[in-house]
Image (tube, grey):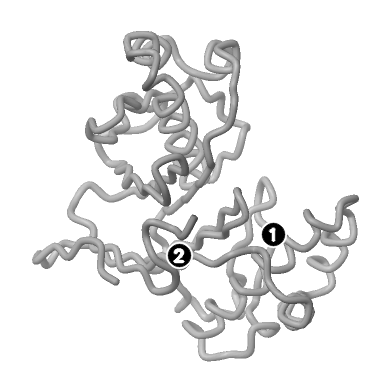
Amino acid sequence: MTLRVVASEAAVALDLWLWPLEVPPERRAALAAHLDAPELARAKGYHRDSDRAAFEVARGRMREILGGYLGCAPRAVPLLTGPHGRPLLGTGAGGRGPAFNLAHAGGWAALVTGPHRLALGIDIEPWREVEPEVAARFFSPAEQAELAALPPDQWRAGFFNAWVRKEALLKALGAGLMRPLDSFDVTLTPAAPARVTRLSGAVAARWQLYPLELRRDFPGCIALRHAGPVALTVREGVLPLPA
């Protein structure tokens, strides 16, 4: 399923993969068998089995997909843990692997892949109840003002638009939560273009936000350092997601 095809030499091709985290026990076991020793140790560190299962299914399927790009078995994908726990391809990939980023929330995993060395991040987050104090704590003054200007029935949509856009950008920057969330601005108004309008220490115009609507109440976002067109293809799953 192709969401957008842009006829341009400068278009960056991205692939999106979506899969459920709830799978039959035998499938979970098969996916967990792909994990290496550090990943298995991390999985064992989760106190709740549901969290452990989500990690195993997300990482195991990610390894299968990356193995397809690299032409190797899932367990042979040379993954390293980068800063802030982000998985990265090691030197064993020979400099030919894709850029990628993984997110999981709300019972689903989302993986985005793109050209090698592209700065790329993704985040997904279903709506839930949230207090206004959270926005006051984490959002910039400009974002708080934009959020406050929304009609009450759009407040939650605006909040989660901002949240997934900021998280995706942090992941693309490779900064994790070391960069304060109020050190940059993103737009958040529903139905308005998604943009980075301020980015401390960098040129905001070089970064692009590609919003995803997994469902009406389940937003996502891809952030990438590329100012030109994007061609996004859904390789696995469908949009919108099934209820």
Residue shown at 38%/23% (left/top)? 185
- Given the current orientation, which residue lies at the most extreme left position? 7
User: In this figure, which residue is indicated by the disc labeled 2?
Assistant: 99
Choose the circle earlier in sequence order: 1 or 2: 1
Asked where in the image residue 50 lies, by quadrant, the reply is bottom right
Is residue 119 or residue 160 the one in the foreground? 160
Asked where in the image residue 157 lies, by quadrant, the reply is top left
Residue shown at 46%/24% (left/top)? 156
Mark 2: amino acid: Ala
Q: Please, what secondary structure does the residue beneath circle 2 have?
A: strand
Spatial CA distance of label 1 from label 2 is 14 Å
* Depicted 132 relative to depicted 17: above or below: above
Is residue 141 or residue 106 the one in the foreground? 106
Q: Position of residue 105 (x, y in %)?
A: 60, 49
Asked where in the image residue 145 lies, by quadrant, the reply is top left
Residue shown at 87%/64% (left/top)? 41
User: In this figure, which residue is indicated by the disc labeled 1?
Assistant: 81
Is residue 128 or residue 199 the one in the foreground? 128
Characterize the local packing of mark 1: few (<14), some (14-19) or many (20 or more) Cα atoms within 10 angstroms: few
Taking the image as shown, residue 150 lies to the left or right of residue 59, namely left
Is residue 53 or residue 15 the one in the foreground? 53
Taking the image as shown, residue 230 lies to the left or right of residue 160, namely left
